[in-house]
Image (cartoon, rainbow, N blue to C red):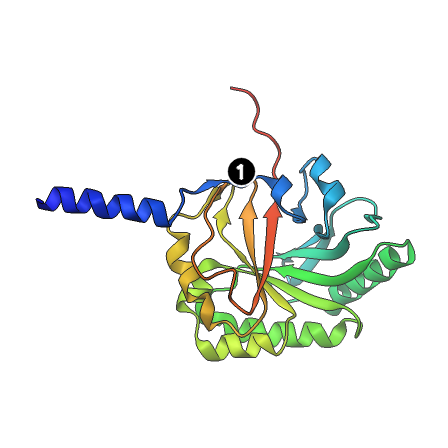
Amino acid sequence: MNRRAVLLAAMGTMTCAFPAAGAVDARDYDAFWLWAGVVPQPVLARAQRLYVLTGQVEPVPGGARLIAQGGAAPLQDRAEVWMAYRAHTLDWPERIYAQIRARLRRWRALGAPVVGVQIDFDAGTRHLDRYGEFLRDLRRRLPPDCKLSITGLLDWAAQGEPAAFDALADIVDEVVIQTYQGRRTVAGYEAYLASLRRLRVPFRIGLVQDGEWREPEGLATNPQFRGYVVFLVNPRPPS
């Protein structure tokens, strides 16, 4: 058998062992991100977990400000709710923490089953230690019964310092690793996710609706793996 035939045979074997990636169908999942400008979809009726964008923290001269987003408190009986905040800076004045606590109290008073706060911040891999300090301080400022979730980048798993990850495990309740940018799955995500066995902190995998996905071998049996979260997007306009 010549080299080309051997290569084709090997590729055929790999195809049998690893099914082709398919599009992410939100109907196959029960945890979702609901971001600003995204029209609610019928699939939300079966949600068990909802991460709702509640505000953005943006830098301004002399500090930062919180821009509130999202409408009425989600009052779904089945889904636990996480208030998600997109952060573009970690230099928060005291009033931002007070605003977050106030909205948490308000939503709970209205009957929303808010279990925690999620911070969506693109921390550089080399600066996870500083991010950990910020998160530890934030945790102290939240009510004791409020959990803390963060999003994570793919290269955290592959390039982050083990000590920085160990520190996060003592601070946050979960990390949701995002496998997408915009509406597309990051190419080569399988190689990044191979490093997840290093994580001590419970984690979920963030997928984008209609993006490409094939579950890597061994992910389902990882003791820290807690499932998936799908980032919902609006349907593309007809061409």
Crowdedness near tag 1: few (<14), some (14–19) or many (≥20) residues, C-alpha within 10 Å: some
Q: Position of residue 81 (x, y in %)?
A: 76, 55
The residue lying at 88 percent from left, 57 percent from top is 106
Q: Position of residue 80 (x, y in %)?
A: 77, 56
Question: Could you tell whether 16 is left or right of 6 in the image?
Answer: right
Dividing the picture into quarters, in which one does residue 169 lie? bottom right
Question: Could you tell whether 239 is left or right of 234 in the image?
Answer: left
Task: State whether residue 67 appears in this view.
Answer: yes
Residue type at mark 1 is: Asp
Dividing the picture into quarters, in which one does residue 113 lie? bottom right
Q: Position of residue 208 (x, y in %)?
A: 55, 44
In the depicted view, which residue is nearer to us: 53 or 220?
Answer: 220
> Tag count in the figure?
1
Task: State whether residue 232 appears in this view.
Answer: no
Check the image and report above or below for 116 versus 213.
Answer: below
The residue lying at 53 percent from left, 38 percent from top is 210
Dividing the picture into quarters, in which one does residue 157 lie? bottom left
Residue topped by disc 1: 210
Residue pushed farthest front? 1
Judged from the image, the secondary structure of the residue bearing numbered disc 1 is loop
Residue pushed farthest top? 239
Check the image and report above or below for 56 versus 38.
Answer: below
Location of the N terminus by quadrant is: top left
The residue lying at 28 percent from left, 47 percent from top is 13
Question: Could you tell whether 217 is left or right of 70 in the image?
Answer: left
Q: Position of residue 66 (x, y in %)?
A: 71, 56
The residue lying at 51 percent from left, 66 percent from top is 222
Check the image and report above or below for 38 versus 157.
Answer: above
